[in-house]
Image (cartoon, helix red, strand yellow):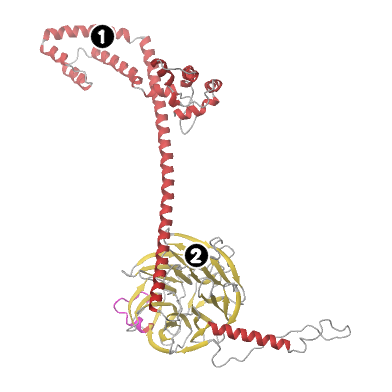
Amino acid sequence: MVQTAASSSRTNQPGRIMEARGLSNFNFSTLGRAPLRLAMKQPVTSQDLGILESTPDLLQTPIPEADGVAKEISLLKGFNATIPSSEKGKARRRQVRNVQFDDENEGEDSSHRKLGMQARGMLTEGAHNDEEHGTHGRKRRGAKRGDALTASKILGKEELSRQRREILQDKENLHVRRRLAQAEIDEITRKINSLDLIRSQLEQDLLRIQEEDLELEDELRGVQERAEFEEQQQGSTATFQPSRRRKGPAFLPSEHDDLPHGVAFMTLASHNAPITALDISEPYGLLVSASQDESTRLWDLSSGEEIAFLRGHTGIVKCLQVEGNLCVSGGTDNTVRVWDLRAVEDEEEALNQSFVGSLASSPRFNAPSIPDAEEEDDTAVLVERPKPAAPARPRGCLRTLEGHTKTVSSIYFEDACLVSGASDKTIRQWDINTGQCVLTMDILWALSHAASQPAPSTSPRGSTFSIPGLPGASLLSAASNSFSFPSPPMADGSWDMYLDFVGGVQFWGYALVSGSGDGAVRMWDMRTGQAHRTLVGHTAPVTCVQFDELHIVSGSLDKTIRIWDLRTGGIAETLRFDYPVTSLQFDSRKVVSCAGESGIKVYNRTTMQMSTLVTNGHTQPVERLRYMDRYLVSGARDSTVKVWAI
């Protein structure tokens, strides 16, 4: 309050006086310094004299209207309202009323009188002595009568006026104290809000520190993984391939570090239909993308150029995975193909050379550029690229794995082990080196023998079961082996009939996790081919699944992503969206997903906040994504592939 009065002194008459005396920067903490020096006979300066002269004006300076403090309350009023002497008038009036009370109740019972006096704390030792000695008591009562006469004289017009003034002054003091208390409360509230803001900032700092710690853990794991590989491969020419199970960056690239986060800095637009699958080898390595136009293209991410086609599938490629120079793809032709991307690049280079040679040998290609004026033939030369006949085994295709009877919709491989899931309701384990099917896991068999924990959306003993959720969900018939599910509309209103019964598979060691069209997430033992646990919670087909040491994360057409705790089998967290989830990937810090919108959803697992990547992004819903280190690629219904810095 004192500081507020000081700051307002410039706008008041006393303030102008102080400015004229050179005390515009006067601090109330120096008040009393001049009288103290004068009293102690210390050296007195002109500023001390100015302070002493300005003290009366300063004390009368009104406090400005600020946060509940009235302008009419001066420093002096505030001081007078809070010192103990402000209660002096109240005490005097109480004493006068006590005298009047004693006089009016002189003839009443003495017990009532004693009770009243005792209640007011006025029964003294002398009063007890008066009761013990009657004579003295009678003399005292006589004295009281004299006091009553005096009181009657006191309670006259002048006394009543005085009491009125005192009461009004007490009310004003209460008003001043109330406003001062309210001002202190407001000040404390501001301090609390300021402390809350500081606390929230510190909490954000702690969250960032936690994220950095998780990133360092991931980087340390990558370094240890590479060190173990180097120890095992001493003297070998094998190249290091990081495990896809490892999450987070191992060695962050230095290129594009100046790019802002959340921006798509590269667009690959050669496909003519929505993207159905994609994967990358490393941030600046190779990208393979597939589309509904039945083309599978190979890209060089360092230049953004298309360098080759993967020719071999006779239908749409629905899933693929890239590890270094090795690529595995599966599609609607019911096959899984293993590719050597280096041989595919060589084949494309050979095709380009043959194409240039055909142009050079073309007679019309060597025709004059300026035609004769009398020539009526069109001079425009349209040379079509020769289409070589597809060989029995396409160049670059190492193996073709046949065994599924329906569309291969999901694959996952590490080292020489490959697992594929298809719309024929089976999951197959393959040996990449030999091309042999090692194990077949039947989801329908697991469904019918799930007596220990049957899913609520299934009928174990029947041949058909329905999927709850959206109206009109179709029936899956074990006899016809058919499956279809109407996908909920995307953000742009488009929708498809979902036919991929196995939405996702991933394994680690002998543990395999799958998500399927009955809305269940199953955990399999690859040594026995048995499903030993079924996680029930989704109400529509599971389209994507991934797991690590602690959690399984699954996305579904029921517009949710569920994070399951592997230790308990329960749902640890549920992320809800407005549209169906078609693809996801997660690590220890975030969950990135395609949720039926043109933007990519990023959920921060540390801060529990959801953000969307939209800058320079897609114009139609995104359906596929893959990220590695700080870079992400996405494919959408607008037929483009975007490369993001995240």
Q: Which mark is residue 601?
A: 2
Q: Counting other residues with Cα less than 10 Å from the Cα at mark 1, is it few (<14), some (14-19), or many (20 or more)?
A: some
Q: Earlier in the sequence, mark 1 or mark 2?
A: 1
Magenta part of the chain: 445-457
Using the rendered image of the protein, determine whether residue 499 is visible from the camera's viewpoint.
Answer: yes
Q: Residue visible at 57% across and 92% down? A: 391
Q: Based on the displayed image, in which of its 4 quarters is residue 117 positioned?
A: top left
Q: Is residue 358 left or right of residue 449?
A: right
Comparing labels 1 and 2, the label whose residue is closer to the camera: 2
- Tell me if I can see residue 547 in this picture: no
Residue 455 colored in magenta in the image: yes
Q: Which mark is residue 148?
A: 1
Instruction: Give the quadrant of the N terminus.
Output: top left
**Horizontal side, residue 523 vs residue 23: left or right:** left
Say few, some or many: other residues with alpha carbon within 10 Å of mark 2 (under 14 / 14 to 19 / 20 or more). Answer: many
Determine whether 545 is above or below 197 in the image. Answer: below
Front residue of 427 and 270: 270
Residue at the farthest right position:
374
Q: Is residue 42 above or below residue 143?
A: below
Under mark 2, the amino acid is Lys
Q: Estimate the x, y position of residue 461 in percent, counting from the top left.
A: 33, 83
**Residue 516 placement (x, y as % from top left):** 42, 77
Disc number at residue 224?
A: none
Prevailing SS of the magenta stretch: loop
Picture coordinates of residue 584 (x, y %)? 46, 70
Q: Amino acid at mark 1?
A: Ala
Vertical relation: 508 (above or below) 138: below
Check the image and name the residue furthest to the bottom.
Answer: 392
